[in-house]
Each structure stands twice: as structure tokens, then as C-alpha cells.
Amino acid sequence: MVGGRARARSPRELTGNPEAWPERPSSDVAAEAVRHIARTLSQTLADQNLSLRAAAAGSGVNRQAIADLLAGRSWPDVATVARLAHFTGTDLWPDSINTERKKTH
């Protein structure tokens, strides 16, 4: 698996309370990025009155892949995020990710 064992658990599982996804922050930098993407995409779809089916048709991303991203069940790839960002006209990637940095030495 790309990403090795770091992606063995879903983004939502890496939050303090998976049931509170995507509102509960994560200390894992990658899960926090996915959480930001999911929150921004969810709000954008609501603001633009777009269903998952419409987002899938317009972006070329599988509807289930979008649902899994929104639910925090999957790690979206760059192509998925890029297609959804282009379709919605929204910058989905976070400007910065606020988590505690791990010291490596």
C-alpha cells in the first residue's frame, strides 16, 4: 500500500473521536489535511446545492469515492482532490495544517 502502515487506519480513525468526524481535529498531519478537504468540500457542495451524483458527474470522480472522502473512510489521491477542486472552483487543500510537530532528533 502506498504510504505504508501510516495509511492502514482511515483518517477518521486518527481523530480523538471518529464519530465526531470531520469536526474533531486530528494530531496526524495527513488525517488533518483530509479532514480539512472533507469539511471544505462538504460545505462547498451544500453552498452550491450539489448532490454527490452531480459532483461525480461534473468532476469525473466516482460518487462512492466522494462519499468515502466526506466520511473520512479513505485517503484521497491528488487527482481526486484536483478534479473536485476544479469542478467546484474551490481551493480544497489547506493553506497550513495546525498539528504539533514531532521531533525527529
Image (cartoon, rainbow, N blue to C red):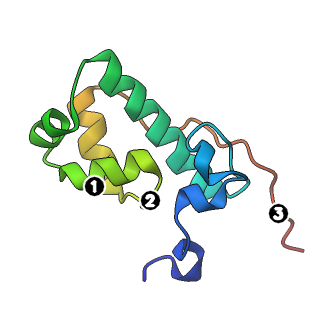
Q: Nearer the viewer, residue 105 or 56?
A: 56
The vertical placement of 34 against 13, above or below, is above
For the question of whether residue 91 can be seen, the reply is no
- In the image, taking residue 31 as reference, residue 100 lies left or right, namely right
Badge 1 crowding class, 10 Å Cα cut-off, few under 14, some 14 to 19, many 20 or more, is some
Disc 2 to disc 1, C-alpha distance: 9 Å
Please name the residue shown 53% across and 77% down the image: 8
Q: Quadrant of residue 25?
A: top right
Checking the image for residue 11, the label placed there is: none
SS label for mark 3:
loop
Please provide percent x and percent y for residue 87: 21, 33
Q: Which residue is mark 1?
A: 65
| Circle 3 or circle 1, nearest the eye | 1
C-alpha span from label 3 to label 1: 31 Å
| Depth check, front residue: 73 or 31 | 73
Q: Does residue 87 lie above or below 43 as drawn?
A: below
Query: What residue is pinned by disc 2?
Result: 73
Q: Is residue 105 visible?
A: yes
Q: What amino acid is at disc 2? A: Arg
Q: Is residue 52 left or right of residue 42?
A: left
Under mark 3, the amino acid is Lys
Please give the residue where the numbered disc 3 appears in the rendered image.
102
Please report whichever mark, 2 or 1, sits nearer to the chain's N-terminal start: 1
Q: Residue furthest right?
A: 105
Q: Is residue 2 above or below residue 39?
A: below
**Three-letter amino acid code of the residue under disc 1:** Ala
